[in-house]
Image (cartoon, rainbow, N blue to C red):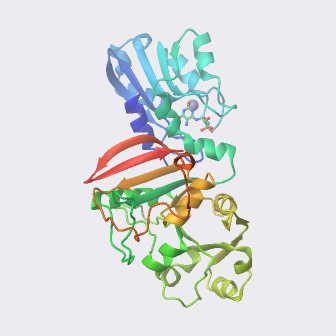
Amino acid sequence: MARAVELARNGRGPTAPNPCVGAVLVHDDRIVAEGWHTRYGRLHAERECLAQARERKVFAQADPAECVMYVTLEPCNHHGKTPPCTEAILDAGIGAVRIGAMDPNPRAAGGAETLRAAGVDVATGVLQRECEDLIADFLVWQRTGRTYNILKMAATLDGKIASAQRVPEPVSCPESFVRVQELRKLAGAVIVGGGTFRADNPSLTCRASGLPEGFCQPLAVVVTSLLPGPDAASTLLRDRPEQLVFWTPQQAAESDTAEALRTRGVRVIGLPGKDGGLDLAPGFAFLRTECGCHYTLCEGGGHLAMSLVEQGLADELVYFMAPRILGDESAPSAFAGRSGMTMKQAVDFRISTAQACGRDLMLTLMP
Ligand code: AOF
Ligand code: ZN
C-alpha cells in the first residue's frame, strides 16, 4: 500500500478536481503490476494496473484468484467518465482487494460491498491515514467551493524566516528550493503577504526544471491593505501585471490607486474584514470559481500564515526546517501576530510525512 501511495502522488495535479489514486497488484508477496490515475477523465488506477498486468502477461503465470490488489481509494462502483473499477476487478477475477481510504463521493462509493458480495476477499483501512491524507484535497473540492490551500514555510530551528533587516536571502538549502518549485508547479496561484511583497520584491514564478512548453505560470496574489502605485518598482507589476492579483480591504479596492492598477491589467479584489484583518475565504473561492485554480500555495510571511491557520484555510502545511539558529528576537517568525497566548491556545497539527531534504527537514503537516 505504501508503494500505491507513492504511485498515486504522480497524479497529484493533473487529476484535479478528482483524487489521485494508486494501485499495485501482488502475487506471491511480489509486486507484479502497478498503475495510477494519471489525469482527470483518464483510466482509473485499477484499470491502469490491470492493463500493465496484461501487457506483462502476468496472468499467464499467476492465477488472478491468487492475486491481491492494493488500492489507495475504494474502487468506484459507478459509470462516470469511465466504467466502474469493480467491474474491471471482477472481470479480471482478482481474488483479494486491500483498500486504503473509503470513497467520500456518494456517487462512486459502495465498491467494497459490491466486491464482497461477488466473493472477493476485501479488507479496508490499510494505511488508512496515509491514504486519507492523499485525498484531503479531494475532500476540500467536494465540500467547499474554494481551492486546496498549501501553506509553505521555510524557517530556522528558532522559527525565523528572515534576518531582522529582512535582506532577501535563502533560509533553506538548494534541495528545498527544488521542492518549492514543484509546489509552485502544482499551484494555480502563489500567495504572499504585503510585507513579503515589499521586502523581497518576489517574482513568484515556477522555475522547476523540465517545464512543459506553454507552461502557464501561477497567478501571484498579494494580500495587503497598502496597495502599491501603478508605477512602483515591483518585478510582478513590471513583468506580469495580468497575472497579479491584490486582496485588499473593500475600501482600498474602491480607491484611485486600485483603479490605476486595474488599467494595467492587475486584478484588485476587495475582501470583507474579519477580526481586525481580512476574511480570506472569499479570496480562495474567487481563485477556484473565477480563475479555475484547484491548488493554491501560500508562502508567508508570518502574519498571513497565522491568519490562514486561524481561519482554517491552511489545508496542508509544508514546513522546511533548516538546521540553523539565528537567535535574534527581532527577526520575523514563521507565524506571527498573536500575543498573550497560553499553550492551550496553540494550534495543533499532525505530522503526515517527515523526510530529509538536503540538509533540511521537510515536514508535511495536516490540521
Ligand atoms: C477509483 N479509481 O483511480 C479514481 C477513482 O468521472 P470518473 O469516472 O473519472 O470518476 C471519478 C470519481 O471516481 C471520483 O469522484 C472518485 O469518487 C472516484 N475516483 N476511483 O476507483 C481511481 N480516480
Ligand atoms: Zn474507478
Q: Position of residue 142 (x, y in %)?
A: 66, 43
Please name the residue shown 58% across and 58% down the image: 308
Closer-to-camera residue (96/32):
96
Residue 190 located left or right of residue 166? right
Q: Position of residue 80 (x, y in %)?
A: 65, 35
Q: Quadrant of residue 337?
A: bottom right
Q: Quadrant of residue 325?
A: bottom left
Q: Position of residue 158 (x, y in %)?
A: 36, 58
Q: Check the image and name the residue furthest to the bottom.
A: 231
Residue 42 located left or right of residue 142? left
Q: Quadrant of ligand 1?
A: top right
Q: Quadrant of residue 277?
A: bottom right
On the question of residue 310 being in view, the answer is yes
Quarter of the image with the N terminus is top left
Above or below, comparing residue 157 to residue 120 in the picture:
below
Closer-to-camera residue (102/133):
133
